Structure formats: C-alpha cells, structure tokens
Amino acid sequence: MLQVKNINVYYDNIHALSDVSFEVKQGEIVTLIGANGAGKTTTLKSVSGVIKPKSGEIHFKQQPIVNTPSHQLLPLGMAHVPEGRRVFSRMTVEENLELGAYIVKNKVQIKEDKEKMFDQFPRLKERRKQLAGTMSGGEQQMLAIARALMSRPELILMDEPSMGLAPVLVQEIFKIIERINKSGMTVLLVEQNANMALQIAHRAYVLETGKVVLSGEGKQLLEDDGVRKAYLGA
Amino acid sequence: MDYGTLFIQQIINGLHLGSIYALIALGYTMVYGIVRLINFAHGEIIMVGAYTSYIMMNVFGVNIVVALIAAVIVCSIFGVTIEKIAYKPLRNAPKMWALITAIGVSFFLQSTVMVIFGVNAIPYPTLFSDLIQVGSLQISQIMIVSLALALALMLSLELFIKKTRLGKAMRASSEDAEAAALMGISVDKTISTAFMIGSALAAIGGVLFAVAYPQIKPLMGVMPGLKAFIAAVLGGIGVIPGAMLGGFILGLIESLTKGFVSAFWPNATLWADAILFSVLIIVLLLKPSGILGKNVREKV
C-alpha cells in the first residue's frame, strides 16, 4: 500500500534522514521505533507531505506522492494523526470531527460517522459541545484519532499517540489502534513506547540517527537482544 | 446645544464612524488570524474602493448600489491578487519581509492612483445627506445606512465563520495551518478567502467613508486604515468579534473627543488622533493580546 524508497531529508545542513526505505502492506500495523531524534516524525511528515524529501520516492497505492501537497493526500485515502494531537482547541469536539470529514461531501455519511465515533469513544459523546482544548490529554488523543477516522481513510499514520498519557490510557490507545486495524484499516505507527508498539505491530523498522538499522516482525524484534537493550530497557 | 444632547449626538456619530472602522478592521484581523501578517496595504484597498465607486458613478453613471458592488468586486480581485503576487512567495520567509513588502504594496497603490488621478482631493457625490431631526439631535441618512449595513455584514460574517464549511476551515487554518492541511483543507484557498472577504469589507468601508466625508484622495486610506488597525489590535488581533468591538470603541472615543475637546480647545481633530494612539499604547502596555484576545501561545 505504501512504499518508501531511499528518501533523504535535510534540515539546513543536518542530514535528518538518509536513504530511509520501508514498506507498509495492506491490512498491516507497521511501526517505526527509535530514540528521540532518530527521524521517526520526520519520516512520517515526509510521507504525509508536510516535509518534502530532497531525494527518494514515495508511492501510495502505486501512485507517486512525493510532490503531492499535504491537503491532497486525504482524498487519496491517507490520514495523519500528528504528534502532540493537534486538535483544534478553540473548536468544539463536534466541530473537530466535522473538520476531519472536511473532504466528505455526503452529509448523511458525516452524520453517521459522527455517531459511530461517539459509539466508539463515549467520552467524546459526553463532551461533544465542549471546546477540545479544555479536555484531558487522553481525551484529546481519542479526538485526534476519531477526527482522522472521519474521512474513512485506508491508511492511517499515527505519530506518538501514547505520548504523555497515563499508563492506563496508553493501554487503551493501543487497544483502539488494534481495533481500528481489525476493522480493515492499515496503520503506520511511530512510537517511543517500543514495547507496546512491537506487541501490536505485524512488522517493525528500527530507526537510528536517520537510518533504518533493523527490521522484522514485531514479535521477533521484541525478542531481539539489541532491541531489548536499546529500547526496551532490558 | 447642552452637554447631554452633545453627548448623545457624539455617541451616534461615534457609532457611525465606528461601524466603518469595524468593517475595515475585520480585514486586518482575518488576514492576521491565518497568515500572521499585518497587511499594511489594507488601507489602500479602502482608497481603491472609493475611487472605483467614484468612477462607476461619474464615468458610467450608475447609482451608488451598483457602484458599491463594483467596488467590492474590484477590491476583492485586488486583495486576492496582491496576496498571490506579493505575499505568497514570502510565506515561509521571515515575517519582517512580508511586512516590508506590505508597506511597499501600499506605496505602490498610492503612487499609481496619484499618477492616474493626481494628488488633489476630488469631490465625491453628495449622497444620503438628508438630516433627520429627532428632538435636538441630528441624524443623517448615511449614519443609519452605514450602521445598518455594517451590522448586517458583521452578522453575516459571524454566521459564515461559525456555521459554514469554509468558515470552519478558516478557523481551523487560523488555529493550526499544518493540522488543517492534514484535514484536507487547502490553506491557500482559505488565505485567498480571507483576503477576498477582508478586501470586500474594506471596499464597503471605503465607499461609506467617502459618502460620509465626501471627497476622495490618494492618501485617504492611510488614517482610516491605521485607525482600523488600532481597532483590530485593541479588540485582539485575530479575533473577529474583537475587531468589531475595537472599531466601535475607537469610533466612540474619536467622536466624543472631537465633540467635547472642541468645546474647549481648537484643533479637536488632532487631539482626537493623539488620544486614539494613546489608547493603543495603553492597551499594548496593559493587555498586549487586546480586549478579547487570547493569550498568545507560541508554537514549538
């Protein structure tokens, strides 16, 4: 579904990503793990058109998308839950969801999907008229995910969805990601919580200082000594 | 005229002037809300609007309504084009570059009009000048027309921003442009819309201003533009109801100062401007984000 081939990204003189390649197949959960500054977010932003790589190719559903601006990727079926949630804090929960469905023309579908999200995330239903900025971090993260689902994407990119959340909520967020995946959506997940990410991922790539240094099945990397030492604290 | 009547009279005048400032201030605030740019060429759009309506009435012989619509169309095109040519290429450049460019655009428009129409003031047709006498108060038709038109436009704008899909997209872009793009919102389109609506309102403000003070000149946009900018800052730049509130407050301060100071000292107009700019300084000192402004949160 998504092929990334040898992308290079520079921030001024800093070589942030060098020859990063990976692939996400339909129906998978693929995770990119790595330390702070390894280039995980940069990789995700390159995929979703926020950053334009200097060289390399990105194909989504066989289409080249390196030159496609961010806002044209959602109509192709790729949604991005950005790092730090980035909900529209001065707008209500309901308005946030409606913006998630900005590209959807069918009003009936928007209404149905909104109700579906309220069923899946009852907390959002209670707070539908509340300003998103007044909610807790966990609720905002759920809103950010629900907002991305409103466009009915085929591939959903998630950047550090567990960041800054209490352990109970972290568990819940990962359950939600698995549920989304089981409902047929492909997931590309960037995480610092390597342990949790590897448990739910079909496949994983390990990034170190802008390079892919290791890849394999999630469970397999969970057993890998190097990964355990570097990222799982064992 | 006793002081009570003078007070009420100046309140009415202030609401009239304030409605014009408010219309112009909306353009500053909408553009700032999305692109974080003080569009200093906005004042010149007022002038372009006034000249357009003048040409329409004097050369093509149309009535004021048609002239107003023409001014709205011409100014919208100007606003969008200026953004595309002058500001868009600088979108990712340091903010100061765009600000200086805006001042450049402002000079360019002033000079172009000077070359074509000369530097002198041209008398504008006298319209809606009938006075309505209410007790000892004098209300001209233009006051009622201006106030009604401005209020109707502000209400429509508020509904547009709150309820429509494009309005919501504009609010989203103003809060977080990158996240808005991830929702499939074309930020370019929302920026164009902000410039279009802002310039259309400035055109109407310009025509109302020319009707109220019936003459036009190349530099006529400078002072109202500057005062509307103060109004936008006073109300909280980037906040739409703030621009409206700021506009009315400014109009009231100006006309009350003129009315009462002129009772004691000559040169009331100069006093009024001095007081207005003092208000800006005091607001910036006490509450830099403006009356309705949110505390500025720097993005990291």
Image (tube, coloured by chain):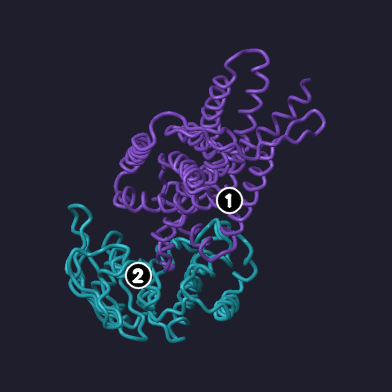
CB atoms at circles 1 and 2 under 8 Å apart? no
Residue at disc 2, secondary structure: strand
Identify the residue position indicated by label 2 in the image.
A190
Query: Which disc, if any, is residue A212?
Result: none
Q: Quadrant of residue A209?
A: bottom left
Q: Chain of mark 1?
A: B
Does residue A196 appear in this view? no
Q: Chain of mark 2?
A: A
Three-letter code for the amino acid on which mark 2 is drawn: Val
Q: Locate residue B270, reporting x and y percent.
A: 54, 20
Q: Residue at x 65, y 32 (%)?
A: B252
Q: Tell me if B188 is positioned left or right of A98 in this view.
A: left
Identify the residue position indicated by label 1 in the image.
B65
Q: Locate residue B11, reporting x and y percent.
A: 70, 32
Of residues B95 and B249, the one nearer the viewer is B249
Q: Residue at x 20, y 52 (%)?
A: A12
Q: Is residue A117 above or below residue B16?
A: below
Q: Which chain is purple?
A: B
Give the position of the N terminus of chain B as an image quadrant: top right
Three-letter code for the amino acid on which mark 1 is drawn: Val
Q: Nearer the viewer, mark 1 or mark 2?
A: 1
Of residues B278 and B268, the one nearer the viewer is B268
Of residues B217 and A134, the one nearer the viewer is B217
Question: Hue of chain A?
Answer: cyan
Residue at disc 1, secondary structure: helix
Q: Residues within 10 Å of mark 1 (few under 14, many from 20)?
A: few
Q: Are marks 1 and 2 on the same chain?
A: no
Q: Tell me if B131 is positioned left or right of B258 in this view.
A: right
Q: Residue at x 64, y 64 (%)?
A: A129
Q: Residues within 10 Å of mark 2 (few under 14, many from 20)?
A: many
